[in-house]
Image: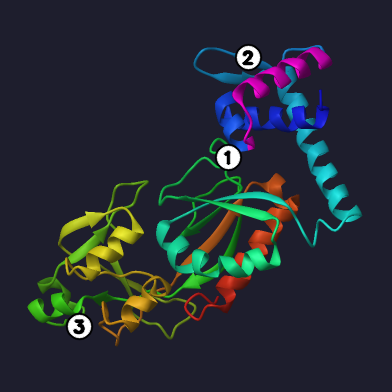
Amino acid sequence: MDRLQAMEIFTRVVESKSFSKAADMLDLPRGTVSNLIRSLEEHVGVRLLNRTTRSVNVTEDGALYYERCVRILAEISDAESSLSNKRSSPTGTVRVDTSGTIARTLLIPALGQFYRAYPHINVRLGLSDRNIDMIQDGVDCVIRMGSLEESSLVARRIGNARMVVCASPAYLEEYGTPATLEDLAQHRAVNYVSSSTGRTFPFEFLKNPKDLNAPETITVQMESLLAVNDGSAYIAAGVEGYGIIQPSRFMVTELLAQGHLREILTDYRCPSTPLSILYPHRQNLNSRIRAFTEWVTDLAHAHPDLRT
């Protein structure tokens, strides 16, 4: 039995609470995972996991062993990094969860740079606009827009996204171009629905944008025929003329340049929204997570619509 491999598998099973999920994360057959856990329990002489047909839970002894395994595996990873070239040339897979719009407009066009710098790192992109359980879903880091909820995760702000109000030329031709916030009462929006609360987000504008200490926000709730909970669908609905939208500018730069969307209400400034990367604290020592995090941070800092 490879004890280090068994310890890595054991930590994945504990975190995901599933033999099948752990096997998928590690690209191993489920039978291999089960056999190695059984061999590990025989080696240490105690039951580490309680198994039922529906769930897998760590025992009291297993919880203590898990904490030791996490520390040992982190120390080994750091030792290997310091004694080899791994810190400058890390290897392995980084599992990233983000929205489809962030992936399509920010990450995917620039991934060629990342692969040239880190040719031995594989990136797995999971796309969602919802909050996920990073540990149970086997995700290494998450990139999200907006204010963050309190959690035990390490959160690092990597940018502030400029917002823009826009609509399709077809919509503006049919309904006219609003010149003031009061004019919005005569228009309709494509509303964006929060995946966590089910509420629609209002449009937001800065009443006193020059006052950096107290920039008061004006909210405008607009009527809509269409509401969506996905960023890509939100932008596509705006392009199709279903209503006015207020997306992050970096997500619609090309559409504005190509004339598929037109910026409106340019006399009013919109508040920016934070862009952050989150990861579990213990993975801060992982060289490939560190490499990906630094790359995404540099990518955001270099973007004119994301600079902090």
- Closest to the camera, between mark 1 and mark 3, is 1
Q: Quadrant where the C terminus lies? A: bottom right
In-image side of 207 versus 281 (left or right): left
> Which residues, given as a range, are shown in magenta?
26-44
Q: Secondary structure at mark 2?
A: strand
Badge 3: residue crowd in 10 Å (few <14, some 14–19, many ≥20): few
Taking the spot 83% from the left edge, 16% from the top edge, the residue there is 43
Residue in the foreground of this view, choosing between 164 and 267:
164
Q: Secondary structure at mark 1?
A: loop
In-image side of 273 versus 90 (left or right): left
In-image side of 233 versus 99 (left or right): left
Residue in the foreground of this view, choosing between 139 and 153:
139
Taking the spot 73% from the left edge, 52% from the top edge, the residue there is 91
Taking the spot 30% from the left edge, 70% from the top edge, the residue there is 246
Q: Residue furthest right?
A: 83
Q: Which residue is mark 2?
A: 50
